[in-house]
Amino acid sequence: MRVLAAMSGGVDSAVAAARAVDAGHDVVGVHLALSTAPGALRTGSRGCCSKEDAADARRAADVLGIPFYVWDFAERFREDVIDEFVASYAAGDTPNPCLTCNEKIKFSALADRATALGFDAVATGHYARLSEGRLRRAVDTDKDQSYVLAVLTAGQLSKAMFPVGDTPKAQIRAEAARRGLSVADKPDSHDICFIPSGDTRAFLGARIGLRPGLVIDSDGTPLAEHDGVHGFTIGQRKGLGVQAPAADGRPRYVTGIDPDSATVTVGPAEDLTVWTIRTERAVWTSGHAPREPFDATVQVRAHGGLAPARAQAVDDGRGIEIELLEPLTGVARGQAAVLYRDDAAEGDEVIACGRIAAT
């Protein structure tokens, strides 16, 4: 097969490309330039798409002896990922930009161009596994990225390859070193790639501006003023701007965000308890929604937030209603709810993904 290997400049994508070469595929490496003004260097494990990353990817391609190109997707990335991220926070939601990037950039824009150029598949360094078109968790559950890949359609998965999903991360680094890849010890990227400072509130504030409102207690008592709802997310405890402690002395958490009135509600931890979730924009990994209710494990955050559940497709499969059998806390609108089928023999399989619309 002709395989396009997406090479970020990190160790995982470099080994993924190497394994595709070993498998006998005709491999071409490509680095996506996603920043309109890339920095020369990364800041430790923060940031991505720097000139250093592009150079690291090129060096890895040279070691593997494969052609290498840099494709400029910066404008598409800004429109589809960054602008949507900002708009979601302005609306009081908590988006996951990695999921959006996979959906609209790596497995849409990139895959579309790859198909147009005659490639049969796109290989990435994501930690997940594919088995007969079914998306499963990675062997290394600590690095598993099936949650942020669950938005991919059956058609997109049919042209995807995840060569490192069957191997623990430590072994991937060791393999990279044996292959002579200079990125073997390169730190993993963390946080939001397009906010290298790590200060999400400042990033959003510079783009949304001041939208002052009130922080109120669960009984409606005003407690503080704020500069915009974009500075808050459900379950947040710190940075609330509230000076006086609660009457009962217990911590307060963000329990509600109303962008229309610019009101942020805070309250005790028990106010965060969720028993039902409704999603929109559902994606069914198999390509079709089941007609009957089904049992599953739901995950509502990229790391953690799992519970057994009973789920039902609604709105002709466009939405999902989820009844939790154990409560979750800190479930934020705008995040993804991913449903897994437990399989002790082969590993958890992704059933569906939906954007959390209400709890």
Image (cartoon, rainbow, N blue to C red):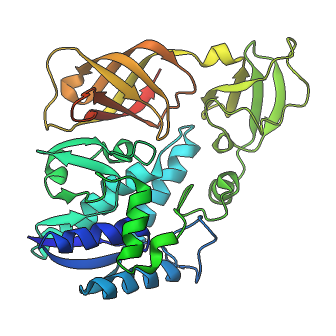
Image vertical order of residue 108 relative to residue 295, above or below: below
x 42%, y 62%: residue: 79
Image vertical order of residue 104 relative to residue 332, above or below: below
Residue 92 placement (x, y as % from top left): 57, 37
Quarter of the rendering occupied by the N terminus: bottom left
Q: Report the front residue among 35 and 1.
A: 1
Image vertical order of residue 217 relative to residue 349, above or below: above
Q: Using residue 269 as the reference point, say whether residue 316 is left or right of it.
A: left
Q: Using residue 280 as the reference point, say whether residue 275 is left or right of it.
A: right
Question: Could you say which quadrant of the image residue 203 lies in?
Answer: bottom right
Q: Using residue 96 as the reference point, say whether residue 342 is left or right of it.
A: left
Q: How many marks?
A: 0
Q: Report the front residue among 143 and 310.
A: 143
x 14%, y 37%: residue: 286
x 49%, y 59%: residue: 82
Q: Report the front residue among 81 and 55.
A: 55
Question: Could you say which quadrant of the image residue 340 lies in?
Answer: top left
Question: Could you say which quadrant of the image residue 259 lies in?
Answer: top right
Residue 45 placement (x, y as % from top left): 59, 64
Residue 10 placement (x, y as % from top left): 44, 70
Residue 340 visible to an observer of this rendering: yes
Residue 76 visible to an observer of this rendering: no
x 18%, y 25%: residue: 316
